[in-house]
Amino acid sequence: MKKTFPSESQPQQSSTLWQKATASFSLMLLGGGIALGGHYIINSPQRIVASTPIKEITQNKRQQTSSEVAIVPQNFVTQVVNNVGPAVVRINASRTVETQIPEAFQDPLFRNFFGSQIPSMPDRQIQRGAGSGFIVSSDGLILTNAHVVDGAESVTVTLKDGRTIDGEVMGKDNLTDMAVVKIEAEDLPIVEFGDSEALQIGEWAIAIGNPLGLDNTVTTGIVSATGRNSMQIGVGDKRIDFIQTDAAINPGNSGGPLLNSQGEVIGINTAIIRNAQGLGFAIPINAARDVAEQLIANGKVEHSFLGVRMTNITPELKEQLKTQYNLEVDADRGVLIVDVLPNSPAAKAGLKQGDIISAIEEQDVSLPKEVQKIVEKTRAGENLDLAIIRQNQTIDLGVEVGVLPNS
């Protein structure tokens, strides 16, 4: 029998078929492995081990997001707060006050009747209060209101970074409600001053302070009015005009800054009217700086003084004077002298009740605040020339300006 051998093409075909089968089988195994692996991963995610822990990635992401928010302000108010906020402080003052015990409790008969039921009260108590202030020099000079530190036996200042430092009252002036506090520190953040004489009604106003114990509170509004005198807002014992704003100012805001949209201080928040809404008042920063400079240099302020009580002339006033006092006032303009204080510069110069001041230093005046501003700008010892209308005749008088007595 003839033995036959396969041809050369047969082994090649068999090899090709075998390779295809092997490749197909490998693909099936790979696909099954991927499917099983995916199923395992989906159902067991906690078993994944990453080169960087997920917690660390999350923390890094949060830190990055937080830093981005701090760097990129959302609006101009945010920018102002970021720039000025670190220079705003909380001022804590404590003073000892005598306890007001009702007179009935001190009556011997009352005590004999009630005996031990009468509560025991200490003769004195420590009274604590808080207000705001802002740093004006890197070595620790702080402006605030006089009523924040009035009568204080100890003062502490809490900075934005959490530090609390003992403070010293360098001086205060109750007539303008201004005070300067000094702390021992260096490289402190400070504010920038604006120009309160250039304010326009309707421009932005931002208040920063610590109202009701809530530190670093920010409120916004507008400048509602300027030149509000102390009588208009119910604080007649003050000798200063005020900025009016509708930015919310609450107890504890006193002494904090009122800022414009550029973050410059335009006033010192000081007064609120009880039961009023949308009415707050601030000391114009130009006047505050003048007072502060005197407090820093001398510890007190010497206010110029004439010694007259005045009112402006109105038709209603003229009718009242004619009816009640039989006093005829022919002038329609000027400032009527209602009273002259004894031994005052005005009394020594010969001014009398009923005189009308028509001009000072050849400058016409028709409102008491105009006279007051001229006097305030005149130093004690200097002379002022007054044009006076007395019994329908004009006379000239020179008055040497004095210093307002402390009382």
Image (tube, rainbow, N blue to C red):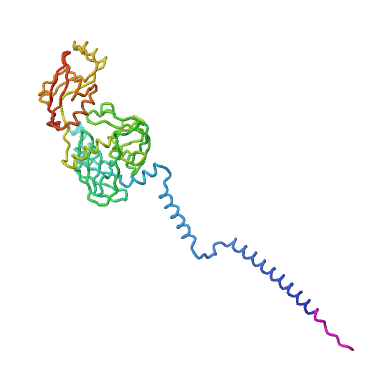
> In which quarter of the view is residue 364 placed?
top left
> In which quarter of the view is residue 126 placed?
top left
Residue 52's place in the image compared with 387, above or below, is below
Q: Is residue 281 magenta?
A: no
Q: State the image coordinates of residue 298 (x, y, percent, origin top left).
A: 15, 41
Decide whether the magenta segment is chiefly helix, strand or loop.
loop
Residue 386's place in the image compared with 78, above or below, is above
Q: State the image coordinates of residue 390 (x, y, percent, origin top left).
A: 16, 15
Outermost residue toward the bottom in this view: 1
Residue 113's place in the image compared with 46, above or below, is above
Magenta stretch bounds: 1-9
Q: Is residue 67 left or right of residue 298?
A: right
Q: Residue at x 86, y 87 (%)?
A: 3
Q: State the image coordinates of residue 129 (x, y, percent, origin top left).
A: 26, 41
Q: Is residue 122 visible?
A: no
Outermost residue toward the front in this view: 362
Q: Is residue 57 left or right of residue 296?
A: right
Q: Is residue 327 visible?
A: yes
Q: Quadrant of the C terminus?
A: top left
> In which quarter of the view is residue 31 placed?
bottom right
Q: State the image coordinates of residue 75 (x, y, percent, origin top left).
A: 42, 42
Query: Looking at the image, which is closer to me, 228 or 181?
Result: 228
Q: Is residue 2 magenta?
A: yes
Outermost residue toward the right in this view: 1
Q: Quadrant of the N terminus?
A: bottom right
Query: Looking at the image, which is closer to me, 140 or 200?
Result: 200
